[in-house]
Image (spheres, coloured by chain):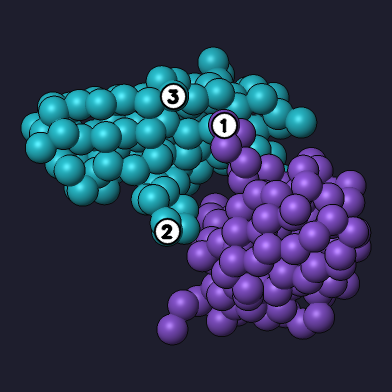
Chain colours: A cyan, B purple
Amino acid sequence: ILNVEQSPQSLHVQEGDSTNFTCSFPSSNFYALHWYRWETAKSPEALFVMTLNGDEKKKGRISATLNTKEGYSYLYIKGSQPEDSATYLCASNTGNQFYFGTGTSLTVIP
Amino acid sequence: DADVTQTPRNRITKTGKRIMLECSQTKGHDRMYWYRQDPGLGLRLIYYSFDVKDINKGEISDGYSVSRQAQAKFSLSLESAIPNQTALYFCATSDLPAGDRVGDTQYFGPGTRLTVL
């Protein structure tokens, strides 16, 4: 069982603020790191998958980085909007199994 | 139509009853998964299947069984439900790594909310 940790657990920001959160994972048995966005009453949806140390991915105002040597990934949201409010999950994929963190709940206040 | 469907969406049952949760997908993926989500905990893997003949236990398989009836169908059974199996259950599928595609991005169904009284 892998211990994947996310911080902070929850976050409230004002519309227009930029924010970031962290996912920590064991660097051994690493295959890929996934980020998902989970809106209330919906299913988690994939944002990014990263495999290589130093990987950076971007989708609109959201971006992510990966450090496999020290076992962490950051997710950044630039100019947060109310529609960004959701829980952001990360998962470490060992090649056979996924291990999810408990998520960071983001609320963007208009 | 949704690519990954789950039935039922909500179910209330009593301790000791047998329950089956069904998952169907039209994505053509070989890999399918069952997770449960509890408040304050991350998604935890119950079982996964990489093809029709391949079934594997996940992190928390005790008290559950699965059946992969076809590439598109993966069912989760609780043989004798107990209250601590009350949770939100998700089915997911993923594709295979190919070329530059890492694969294993999970596509989730809408979830089944199960309550065991």
Q: Which residue is mark 3?
A: A9
The residue at 71%/78% (across/down) is: B73
The residue at 42%/56% (across/down) is: A41
Q: Residue A33, labelled with which disc?
A: none
| B41, B47: nearer the viewer | B41
Discs 3, 1 touching: Cβ within 8 Å: no
Relative to A47, residue B30 above or below: below
Say which quarter of the image contains residue B56. Answer: bottom right
Label 2: element kind: loop
Q: How many marks?
A: 3
Q: Is residue A47 left or right of residue B91?
A: left
For disc 3, the neighbor class at 10 Å (few under 14, some 14 to 19, many from 20) is some
Q: Amino acid at mark 2?
A: Lys
| B73, B102: nearer the viewer | B73
Query: Could you say where residue A64 lies in the image, as x and y percent from the top left?
Result: 35, 34
Query: Could you say where residue B17 lies in the image, as x and y percent from the top left?
Result: 86, 64
Q: Amino acid at mark 1?
A: Gly
To which chain does the residue with label 2 belong? A
- Distance in Å between CA atoms under marks 3 and 1: 9 Å
Label 3: element kind: loop
Which numbered disc, 3 or 2, marks the residue that appears first in the sequence? 3
Say which quarter of the image contains residue A25. Answer: top right
Relative to B86, residue B67 above or below: below
Q: Which residue is mark 2?
A: A42
Asked whether the viewer can see residue B22, the reply is yes
Q: Which residue is mark 1?
A: B40
The residue at 38%/33% (across/down) is: A105
